[in-house]
Amino acid sequence: MRRMSDVIQQKLNHVLDRAENPAESMDLAYQKQLQSLQQMRSSIADVLTSEKRLELQAADLKQRQTKLQDQARTALTQGNEDLARLALTRADTAGQQLADLDVQIQQLTTQEQKLQVTAQKLQAKVEAFRTQKETIKAQYSAAQASTRIGEAVTGLSEHMADVSMMVDRAQDKTRQMQARSAAIDQLIDTGALNEIGPGSADDIDRQLAAASTATNVDSQLAAMKLALGSGQAQLGLGDGSLVVRIQGEDQYRIARPVAADLETRDALIVKAIEAGDEAGFSAALKSSLDLVRGHGQRLGEDTLQGSDLVLPAEDTDLAEARSIMNPAPPSAP
């Protein structure tokens, strides 16, 4: 039975050790010390209350003693010696009681002083324990955080171990997919895997088509620049201003700084056309038209003057802009 008791006690101690939190234990000990300090202060208050009560009684006895002595003098003046003797006897009794009260008051004063000194010492110990408690709690929290971080970094944590396994599997699948994609691209480039259908082309056809596309893009870019008047030479005509016509609208005269800004926006239009960006083309075209309308001087209908630059109408779409950059060749007779 003793052995069983020891085993049970060992198990309970192990469970309690795991459940015990040093920070909570220190807080509990600090609370108990605060309660002891509060009880000490309450005891001092009780002693001080008793002392004040005895002081009030002593004041009453002293006042009564003085009154009896005055009564004895009055009785002697009137020739009543017996009454004077009675008054003096009571005055003497009051004096003895007053002396006893003085002794008790002195004892309570001494006891109060001792309690005050004890309370001050206890207060100092509580403050020192509070500092020690906060230090131990901080050290325990730091050690606990360091342990958690170490477990997370070294993969000892179960959660981090699962995350590491998932990352490894994802990286393996990504490498396999990249290798498969590179192999397919290489087979297509070498012509080993040609496209299925009557329109399939070999690698030579694809290279020729790529060269033709690059040539067409260069031609379209040159034509678009010519149509929109984005050449640097146009910006230096006349007095430095530029006459711009918006298709379907009027002519506007813009200053050289505005013309430079318009050239920048013109480059955005060309870039959007090359990229096939319908939304970007519309936004760049609207920005250019707003610049001309907002900063240009509108020319009257009776003013006949050649336009240095022609901008497409606002409702021009990407296909129409491409046709402007790359006009269709004339049909053969």
Image (cartoon, rainbow, N blue to C red):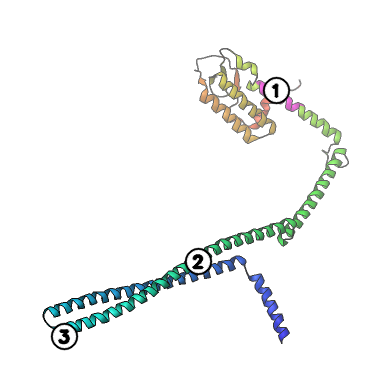
**Quarter of the image with the C terminus in it:** top right
Residue in the foreground of this view, choosing between 236 and 32: 32
- How many tags in the picture? 3
Q: Which residues are magenta?
A: 215-226
Secondary structure category for the residue under label 2:
helix
Pinpoint residue 173: horizontal percent, then vertical percent: 79, 52
Which residue is at 30% across, 73% downward? Answer: 56
Callout 2–callout 3 Cβ contact below 8 Å: no
Whether residue 67 can be seen here: yes
The disc label shown at residue 82, or none: 3
Q: Are marks 1 and 2 in contact (CB under 8 Å)?
A: no
- Circle 3 Cα neighbour tier, 10 Å, few/some/many (<14 / 14–19 / ≥20): few
**Residue matched to label 2:** 121
Query: Residue lying furthest top in this view?
Result: 238
Q: Amino acid at mark 2?
A: Lys
Q: Which residue is mark 1?
A: 222
The residue that appears at 66% across and 25% down in the rendered structure is 324
Three-letter code for the amino acid on which mark 1 is drawn: Ala
Secondary structure, mark 1, is: helix
Q: Residues within 10 Å of mark 2 (few under 14, many from 20)?
A: few
Which quarter shows the N terminus?
bottom right
Residue 164 shown left or right of residue 131 in the figure = right
The label nearer to you, 2 versus 3, is: 3
Disc 1/disc 3 C-alpha distance (Å): 146 Å
Rounded to the nearest whole Å, what is the CA distance between mark 1 and mark 2? 96 Å
